[in-house]
Image (tube, rainbow, N blue to C red):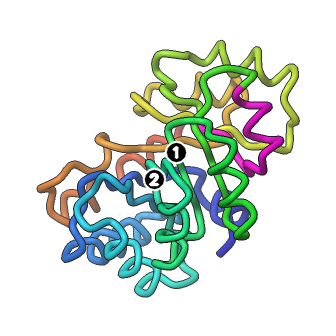
Amino acid sequence: MDFNSARAQLPLVAILRGIRPDEALEVGEVLVAAGFTLIEVPLNSPEPFDSIARLARGLGERAMVGAGTVLDKPSVDAAAEAGARLILAPNTDVEVIAHASGRGLTVMPGVATASEAFAAIRSGAAALKLFPASSLGAGTVSAWRAVLPRHVPIFAVGGIDGASYAQFTAAGVDGFGIGTALFKPGMTADAVASRGGEIVAEWRRSIG
């Protein structure tokens, strides 16, 4: 499954910060059952490349598995070798973006200014992550949408909950990253399944 197909099905990235390899696939399966097609394992999780590999093998074409908090080129390479096809970061590092894009990976760097957004796009970013979205606000997206290429999707990440969807979508956001509202270390797969179903339902209600 490629990025555009995945986000067309459900433009929500499940951020599994702190997930362990031994629970990764079970959690991934319940997320796919809930409708998620974009799954991120941040690299500051325990043994993240092992979790990425298990998810990529186990979920196959049912979801696009990515690595998050990717801050350097070696991490890009290790994530790609583990099976990640999506590279996410909290920052805009043009060298890392270009390296990942050059490997044929979909790159979604974090941006907080219009200058960072344009630099990221020039370097090969396929999408932009508005981060931290709760601090920057929907008004930031409205202003950016007047100048940024419309074909480049913007995902709002950081402090996002059900009350945020309609406002940010109206401003021009194309998707969202959901972290602690969906998954926290220690949660059971059943708990993640329940929360995932609630989040998908909230998002669908927000778009009518």
Q: Position of residue 85 (x, y in %)?
A: 59, 69
Tell me which amino acid carries mark 1: Ala
Residue that carries the numbered disc 2 in the rendered image: 68
The alpha-carbon separation of the residues under discs 1 and 2 comes to: 6 Å
Of 184 and 74, nearer the camera is 74
Residue 117 counted in the magenta span: yes
Nearest to N terminus: mark 1 or mark 2: 2
Q: Which residues are magenta?
A: 116-129
Position of 190 with respect to 81 (left or right) is left
**At x 38% / y 65%, what residue is drawn?**
31
Of 21 and 58, nearer the camera is 21
Q: Which quadrant is home to the N terminus?
A: bottom right
Of 28 and 66, nearer the camera is 66
> In the picture shown, does residue 70 fall above or below 74?
above
Position of 110 with respect to 28 (left or right) is right
Q: Which quadrant is home to the C terminus?
A: top right
Look at the image and tell me whether residue 208 can be seen.
Answer: no
Residue that carries the numbered disc 1 in the rendered image: 89
Is the residue marked by circle 2 packed among few (<14), some (14-19), or many (20+) residues within 10 Å? many
